[in-house]
Image (cartoon, grey):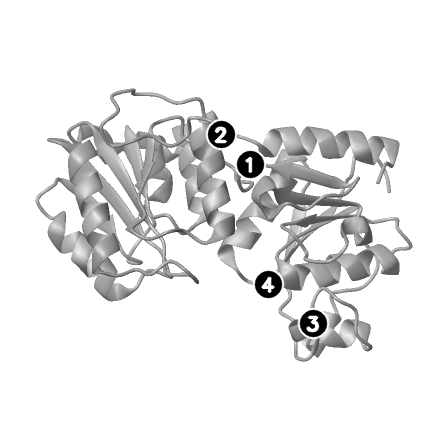
Amino acid sequence: MPYPPHSAWVISDGAAGNERQALALASALDVTARVMTLPLRAPWAWFAPRHIPGGRLALAPRDRAGFEAPWPDVAIGCGRSAALLTRMLRDLSDGDCYCVQILDPRIDPRHWAAVIAPRHDRLEGANVLHTLGSLNPIDDAWLASGREAFPDFEALPRPRVALLVGGPRRGIEFDEHLAQRVIETVRAVARNGSVLATASRRTPPEFAARLRDALAGFPGVFWNDEGTNPYPGLLGWADRVVVTPDSVNMLSEACAAGVPVHTVAVTPLPEKIARFHAALRERGLLTEAGETRNSVAPLRETQAVAVELRKRMAARLP
């Protein structure tokens, strides 16, 4: 592999959150990346990233044709499906492709040149790089670009509160109890300001409608998959952020904005998510609704991970 690397593949299963992390890392490495969306077929998808016979038959024929030499200098995957392909690439390229896997692959990390995993996953290994949250592209330039793209938000009354709404996952229900706590928290921190809200693809429509109706008295916007997603403008102009408790990605990106971040939970969180929330609180990255501070040191880890990877690539360390 040449150093610095000249080519990269970002291998995606189509999950937007996974692809976003891999692209953020490729950008931080300052390497042009080819995005390859490569869903796995059964039965390989069931066992990934464990090897079962058949190798590239895990891919549909149209995808298999692109998964061939010349191999990239670096391959970055995120998520369990991509992990099978980054693992295969390391073997197919005779180790010449530096294969990086983001998130715990749930098998021994030695199958990759490097694995990047949040500390709450408790993955250990000589080639494991730990982060507090998830990788993302958010820095001062990204936030400034968001403000430039959505200049009308500047006129909204302050405090401008960004509301980021995710969706249910095992152990976290999006029910009336959570909706009410989110509404109460937004009202407490917005006071006489404005609300800039966005729902995700995972948000139950009835949950989004409940929040939209309850917060309709605030000036601002409530985006729900129509027109251009104002997400960069929301974080760029936000004085405070309220986030539902379910998403490591959303919480990490909110904490990268450098403003107070609030989240709520109405029942005990699943163990790994609870560890993540506890780590954010220990670092002072989550703020109680009654606190008056106006700024927080931002959580930005992507560049530091890229610096460490460059060192390892240059030295060809595991």
Q: Residue furthest left?
A: 217
Q: In this figure, which residue is indicated by the disc labeled 3?
A: 47
Number of the label disc, if any, that sits on residue 13: 4
Q: What is the C-alpha distance between the residues marked 3 and 1?
A: 28 Å
Q: Nearer the viewer, mark 2 or mark 4?
A: 2
Residue at 86% over, 36% down: 317
Viewer-side residue, 57 vs 242: 242
Q: Nearer the viewer, mark 2 or mark 1?
A: 1
**Mark 4, mark 1: which one is toward the viewer?**
1
Report the side of 3 relative to 261 (left or right).
Answer: right
50 sits to left or right of 217: right
Give the structural element (helix, strand or loop) at label 2. loop
Q: Earlier in the sequence, mark 3 or mark 1?
A: 3
Q: Which residue is mark 2?
A: 299
Which residue type carries mark 1? Leu
Q: Relative to the observer, which residue lies in front, 233 or 238? A: 238
Residue 284, image x, y percentages: 42, 26
**Mark 4 surroundings: few (<14), some (14-19) or many (≥20) residues within 10 A:** some
The circle drawn on residue 132 is 1
